[in-house]
Amino acid sequence: MVSLTLSVPPELKKRMEKHPEIRWSNQVRAIIQQQLDDLETTDRLASKSQLTEKDVEELAAKVDAGMAKRWKEAKREARR
């Protein structure tokens, strides 16, 4: 297995040391694996897509607007 050196700020290291029961290298390995799995899934889906960059930008803008509207409505409901 290949080794990877990771630098973390001193404060983060102190917090990690409070949990010696955790095998941090295993946690980081799992996070890297999940990120790669997600990227490969995205690549696989994108390779089959017929959308143009402009289509994607327009769709993203619509999703953003819809989410903003839902958030504002939820916030308004919470105040009632």
Image (cartoon, rainbow, N blue to C red):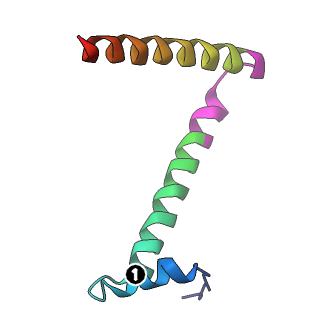
Asked if residue 51 shows in the view, the reply is no
Q: Amino acid at mark 1?
A: Met
| Direction from residue 72 to residue 62 in the image, left or right | right
Q: Which residue is mark 1?
A: 16
Residue at (47% x, 73% y) in the render: 28
Q: Is residue 65 left or right of residue 14?
A: right
What is the x, y in percent for residue 70?
Answer: 40, 14
In this rendering, does residue 63 appear at all? yes
Q: Position of residue 29 (x, y in %)?
A: 47, 73
Between 1 and 26, the one lying in front of the other is 26
Q: Is residue 74 magenta?
A: no
Residue 47 in the image: state x and y as whole percent: 66, 34
Q: Is residue 49 magenta?
A: yes
Q: Residue at x 59, y 88 (%)?
A: 3
Q: Residue at x 58, y 49 (%)?
A: 39
The residue lying toward the viewer, choosing from 46 and 64, is 64
User: How many marks can you see?
Assistant: 1
Q: In which quadrant of the rendered image does the C terminus lie? A: top left
Q: Overall secondary structure of the magenta stretch? A: helix
The local crowd at label 1, few if under 14, some if 14 to 19, many if 20 or more residues have their Cα within 10 Å, is: some
Q: Residue at x 46, y 64 (%)?
A: 31
> Seen in the image, is 48 located left or right of residue 29?
right
Query: Is 67 drawn above or below residue 4 in the view shown?
Result: above
Looking at the image, residue 51 lies above or below residue 10: above
Question: Which of the 4 image quadrants contains residue 17?
Answer: bottom left
Quarter of the image with the N terminus in it: bottom right
Query: Range of the magenta residues?
Result: 43-54
Q: Secondary structure at mark 1?
A: helix
